[in-house]
Image (spheres, rainbow, N blue to C red):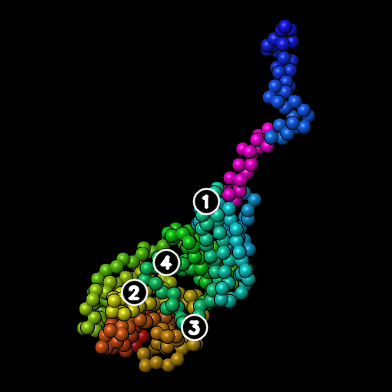
Amino acid sequence: METKDDKPDGSATGLARRVDAAPGRRGFTTRPLRVRLAVVLVAFSLVPVGAVGFGLYRLTNLGGPDSVCDGAVTADQVHHLLGSGRISESKGRYSATEDYTGNTCTARVTSGLFQTSTAVAQFTITHNTDDGPGALASSDARLFSGDSAGSVTPDVAWAVLPEGCEKGVRAEVRTSETGQDETRARLAVALANDVAKARGCGNGVPPAPASLSEKGIDSDPDWANLCGLPGFAPAKNPEARWRMPQQVTTATAPIWSCTIGGDPRRDSRVQQFAITTEPQTTALGRKNGTASDLGRAQWVAGGTLVTSCQGKDVFFTVTGGYSSQLEKRYLFPDRDDLVRQFLTAGGKAIGCEPIL
């Protein structure tokens, strides 16, 4: 017999009575079973919250570091370079006040819920070696100069420390990501400024570069005006008949560079010319030079000469061009004439006083 209490009741009291009775109707008739049901329901209700927390941890930098490399690079700058995700760093012995091989701080950004990806950037403080500034030359570089000076290639972006700091020290940025030349250049300058601040040196704080020079394109050389230098016409080895593309930077500072390509099937190396117009790139100078028969120029490192130009040290580098498959082993066999012509034509191109 159905009583009034058994009948459906739309009131709050009736609804509460039916909810309270529901576990019993589904077999949860004892207190332990009812407690277990309550735990399961609570756990189930928390799954979305945990999933959100898991997602925030894996996809964002929530709770992660605000900066890396002792504050030199902010989290926003790292994300701009490497993309969103969780930031971590490894510093080792990294120090903004020391010069030693491997003085590097590494930042990583990890992202993804289940299949993760990791992007890496390395921030390095390095000191120029005795190889001279020509070792930094690259014909595919995009250059910037003025208040701040440096270079960006597909492999590395670097900036020298401000004037008033030790010469030859530079900040480098390397990354697993391609492109983003402007971002890497700005980070290199920011790191250089942080190093200068830590060392208490520098005449002011150089701003980030406003623009980068365009990348030089491959072209066939004009053998009467090699590398775009009027009158630079060294005699080419007549045995070298393969195509040798030429690439030249589109700016002269801090390091102008030109390469004449070789054919790897003939074991040929690239011929490189470089003019370094920014003295901050190297600790070397005229004080390190040794006498030569090349006018005002002195040998200062392998393949590199130093001279003064408008009161500043300027470096001319000639390297490469060797091929074991040629009877006369070089693309330009008369090496003395090659260097003399380069000093003359290159010096004129940058407005230098006569060198020879």
* Left or right: 110, with 18 as reference point: left
Q: Quadrant of the C terminus?
A: bottom left
Look at the numbered discs 4 and 2 and tell me whether their residues touch, using CB distance below 8 Å.
no
Farthest residue to the right: give it. Answer: 31
Residue 272 placement (x, y as % from top left) = 35, 78
Residue 330 placement (x, y as % from top left) = 29, 85
The residue to which callout 2 is attached is: 258
Element class at badge 3: loop
Element class at badge 1: loop
Which label sits on residue 115? 1
Main SS class of the magenta portion in the image:
helix
- Mark 4, Cα crowd under 10 Å, few <14 / some 14-19 / many 20+, is some
- Which of the two marks, 4 or 1, is nearer to us in this view? 1
Q: Indicate the quadrant where residue 257 lies.
A: bottom left
Asked whether residue 198 appears in the rendered view, the answer is yes
The answer to whether 26 is drawn above or below residue 176 in the figure is above
Q: Which residues are magenta?
A: 41-61
The answer to whether 348 is drawn above or below residue 247 in the figure is below
**Is 77 in the magenta?**
no
Total number of numbered discs in the rendering:
4
Viewer-side residue, 326 vs 275: 326
Picture residue at 25% right of the left edge, 88% below the top: 327
- Mark 2, Cα crowd under 10 Å, few <14 / some 14-19 / many 20+, is many
Asked whether residue 338 appears in the rendered view, the answer is no
- Mark 3, Cα crowd under 10 Å, few <14 / some 14-19 / many 20+, is few
Three-letter amino acid code of the residue under disc 2:
Cys
Three-letter amino acid code of the residue under disc 3:
Asp
Picture residue at 54% right of the left edge, 49% below the top: 114
The residue to which callout 4 is attached is: 153
Q: What is the spatial separation of the Cα atoms under label 2 and label 3, in whole angstroms?
A: 21 Å
Residue 313 placement (x, y as % from top left) = 45, 81
Q: What is the spatial separation of the Cα atoms under label 4 and label 1, in whole angstroms?
A: 31 Å
